[in-house]
Image: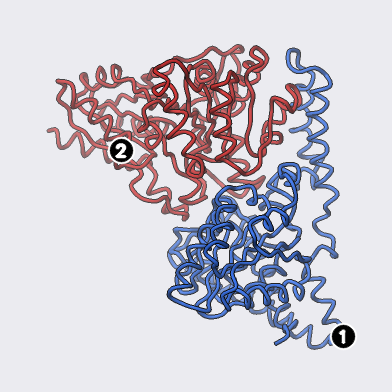
Amino acid sequence: MRNSLFTQAVDDVLAQAMAKDPRVIIMGEDVPMLRSNLLVRFGPNRVLGTPISESSFLGAGVAASMAGLRPVVEVYMVDFLGVCMDALLNHASKVEAFSGGKWTAPVVVRAPCGGGYGDGGQHEQSLWGWLAHIPGLTVVVPSTPADAGGLMLAALQHNGPVIFFEHKLLSEMWLEIMGSGGRTTTQYDVPGGGAKGTVSKHMEPIPIGKAVLRRSGSDITIVSVGVGVHRALEAAELLEKEYISASVLDLRTVSPLDKTLVCESVAQTGSLLVVDEDYESFGLSGELSAVVSETSITCKFARVCTQTTIPYSRSKEDQVLPNVDRIRNGALTLLESRR
Amino acid sequence: MPPDIWLLYSQMLKSRLFEEAIAKLWHDGLISGEMHLGTGEEAIITGVVSNLREGDSMALDHRGTSAMLIRGVDPVPILHELLGSPKGLCGGMGGHMHLFSKEYLAASSGIVGAAGPTAVGFALAAKYLRPGTVTTAFFGEGAMNQGMLMESINLATVWNLPVLFVCKNDRWSITTESAKMTGGDLNERVHGFGVPVVEEDGLDVLAVWNAAHDAIERARSGLGPTFLHAHCVHLEGHFLGYQLKRLIRSPIKDMPDVAIPLTQSFLKPSGANIRERLSGMNSIISTVMATLRSSRRESRKDPLFLAREHLHSESTRLKELEDKVEQEINQILASVLEEETS
């Protein structure tokens, strides 16, 4: 075991996969400089810079995967997928169905996401619910370096399109580029356990669609992904002081959902609180409510999500994104209503 | 009517000093995330925007602060906005990449190339609702590979819309040299859409003013869009804290962080052959060298320095003007900071 930072873990498994499989290539804007360590080892034929032409290079990545390559296509931010959504919505996700199951597009899209550093509502969105809505897309949202490495390896082995989310607050590289820019005068609420952690020397894939229980409790199940998991863990510690025992479940994969583990935990606690940095309406939180409602489990439900466009103002942003206070209060209100 | 170089210079200086104040606030941590300044492109912005009048509109990119200021938007709420204050131009919701002024029909976007469709839409509305008015779109040369911008240039010409497309070419798409990612010649590309192209030195405010003046008059009289291709240098690089600039500015401090892992990775077994690896290493070195060579602080690359040369002969008047602008910006900064802290 060794210590690793979040993005370092992803880049390390990419190197591991590229050394093993010559079909793995990386492409995207500024990628030769952003992944210079991979460039000098694997050369410019496998680490490709692109113009600012998301529609064409993401679309090309999808087709290249259909024709035998294993492309990892990077976009600067998940928000920018808006420019090239067609490649995912109408192509990558549809190939398997349209071909009668005979052909797939095993492309990995690596997309930095999330807020908490003051970049505003066009550069800090989460959008995993938006992508998970589309049948045929696999969506993973790791919350620790070990999961980031393991899920990237799984994504590279998966026989279909995978969107790999990399939260900018957890990523030492993205927070430095988009946030501090080398300054020492800024402070960000970075969850330590998410930005840094132990990883195996030789990482193994983590199965897609498997959630993990980060904390075991008996009164309430808090379900989240990404940075939300760490905020939920912090809230759970505060709740403990008020004699409330909370489970915290890290989904790790948004699509497909680990319905079994969610339902198992909720059946035990009888209360489900979803913490989601993505938008509240028509998304992951509502989906989780539906998943439980479709079983015979009876449970109380509440959610702490992002309800509006993310404000640029740091103080407003901290209120709009799910924070520890909102999670704690959400849990207390939910349990109060149960009494 | 010929351009008034005194007025143009004072606008450029106002923009420069305002953005330098912003840089200070950013360095002090009062602005949290990214900050893209327009320092170095003042001659382009001033030369174009000072040709606009009531009812004209602007589609701005992620670097629109200067255009807002020169268009006449009150600098006090702009500065409040950048500090994320409720007193800000957009109530602290937008920040510098998302500045909006309905009053001046000016809209920004942090999505590269988005100024294209916005300008076409503004111009379409202008044609029906405000005949004789025009729209300007500002974007960098990196945006010229973005489909939506190419589609917009085509749409503006087939609908014969009053748009001035302004390409601010600083040769860099963040850490990528744009030429390496761009096929053919940009002017020829735009010619291919049937749109007239004017290429100017974007450091020369008089040249830009004249070119913009002709193109805007042409658009006002219903003769359709023009593409203004103007060259400049971004003095701070892509944004404040720009990686390549930091790397060459403090090589001793930052180099080992980069060079050691790079060398280790270069030497790792299993990977490409040595020729491929060297080619990768060379492309990094050539990017750093290109950054080194484009001396961003050279006075001959500074549009303010060049504009000022026209005014040297009247040194007293020049000093008065510079003192006045400096005082104005200092007062704005002081009053905004006082309001923020009170």
- Is residue A304 or residue B266 the one in the foreground? B266
Query: From where the camera sits, is residue A116 visible?
Result: no
Specify the quadrant of the image occupied by residue A210: top left
2 and 1 marks on the same chain: no
Q: What element carries label 2?
A: helix
The x, y position of residue B26, in whole percent, is 62, 56
Q: Colour of chain A?
A: red
Q: Distance between the residues labelled 2 and 1?
A: 69 Å
In the picture, the quarter occupied by the N terminus of chain A is top right
**Which residue is pictured at 63% across the width and 31% down the height?**
A27
Quadrant where the image shows the C terminus of chain A: top left
- In the drawing, does residue A149 fall left or right of residue A101? right
The reply to whether residue A200 is in sight is: yes
- How is the model colour-coded? by chain
Which residue of the protein is positioned furthest toward the left in this rendering? A339
Q: Taking B179 as reference, is A77 left or right?
A: left
Tag of residue B313: 1
Q: Give whichever of A227, A142 is nearer the camera.
A: A142
Q: For numbered disc 1, what is the local secondary structure?
A: loop
Q: Mark 2 highlights which residue?
A: A328
Residue A110 falls in image quadrant? top right
Amino acid identity at mark 1: Ser
Q: Colour of chain B?
A: blue
Position of residue A120 relative to residue A296, above or below, is below
Q: Quadrant of residue A177?
A: top right
Q: In the rendered view, does A235 fall on the left or right side of B327?
A: left
